[in-house]
Amino acid sequence: MAKLFNYKHKESLKMKNLSIVVILVLFIVSCNQKGNEGTYTLNGKINKEYNEFVYLQKYSKGKYSIVDSAKARHGEFKFEGIVDLPAIHYLQLSDGAGSFSFFLENSEISLEVDADSMENSSINGSVTNDLFKKFNGQNKEYNEKLHKIYNEYNDADIKNQVLIDSLDAEYEAIEGEQMAYYNTFIRSEERRVGKE
């Protein structure tokens, strides 16, 4: 079997993406220490009349835990607190029908919550979240290309070594492009943050 595909593909990509997230967050924190002082205020507005609880959650050690809760009044809610570092948090309505993930950091943040389709909710005021979305926009293209090659590999005849070698080379080339993107992205953001 070809060297590139001798590991569990999904677990490898998951760990790789998790590592990138950690590196990205640490980069942001190191470049923007002033942004981590103070507190956060999270003001939310739900796109319909809603008078139930809203939950702020964090995922750790294989499970979600509630960090805070607030009773919405006429679709509006507010959370206040302090986080040591920007971190991914989740917003969930009391009906439990989906959640919205975002980076919570010590700043003034506003959320527009789509109660019927949580993934369509939006956030403003989190520099870390904006940077993460920007990063993921391009990274998604690389992951889709890699996934396509992986599927072609699975469909290939194992005896067709020429095809397998070709897919290995293509996969490695895209991984190289992806790593170059990571480096370019970090350098450009480092210069941008340095100017602020």
Image (tube, helix red, strand yellow):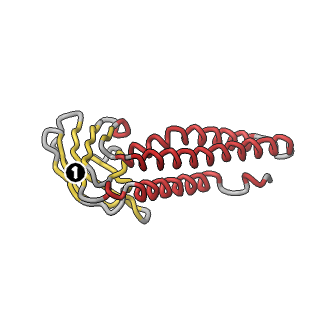
Secondary structure at badge 1 equals strand
Q: Is residue 2 left or right of residue 121?
A: right
Q: At 36% across and 50% down in the image, what residue appears?
A: 103
Residue 115: x and y in percent read: 28, 38
Residue 129: x and y in percent read: 38, 46
> What amino acid type is highlighted by mark number 1?
Thr
> Does the rendering let one see residue 133?
yes
Q: From this viewpoint, which residue is outermost toward the bottom?
A: 61
146 and 107: which is toward the camera: 107
Q: How many marks?
A: 1
> Mark 1 highlights which residue?
41
Rendered view: 150 above or below 2 = above
Q: From this viewpoint, which residue is outermost toward the left?
A: 73
129 and 97: which is toward the camera: 129
Q: Is residue 33 left or right of residue 14?
A: left
Dot 1, how many residues are within 10 Å of its Cα: few (below 14), some (14-19), or many (20+)?
some
74 and 171: which is toward the camera: 171
Q: Is residue 38 left or right of residue 73?
A: right
Q: Could you say which quadrant of the image residue 68 lies in?
A: bottom left
Q: From this viewpoint, which residue is outermost toward the front?
A: 195
> Does the rendering let one see residue 67?
no
Residue 60: x and y in percent read: 40, 63
Q: At 33% across and 52% down in the image, what residue appears?
A: 104
Q: At 86% across and 45% down in the image, what residue appears?
A: 161
22 and 115: which is toward the camera: 22
Residue 33: x and y in percent read: 36, 58
Q: Is residue 175 left or right of residue 74?
A: right
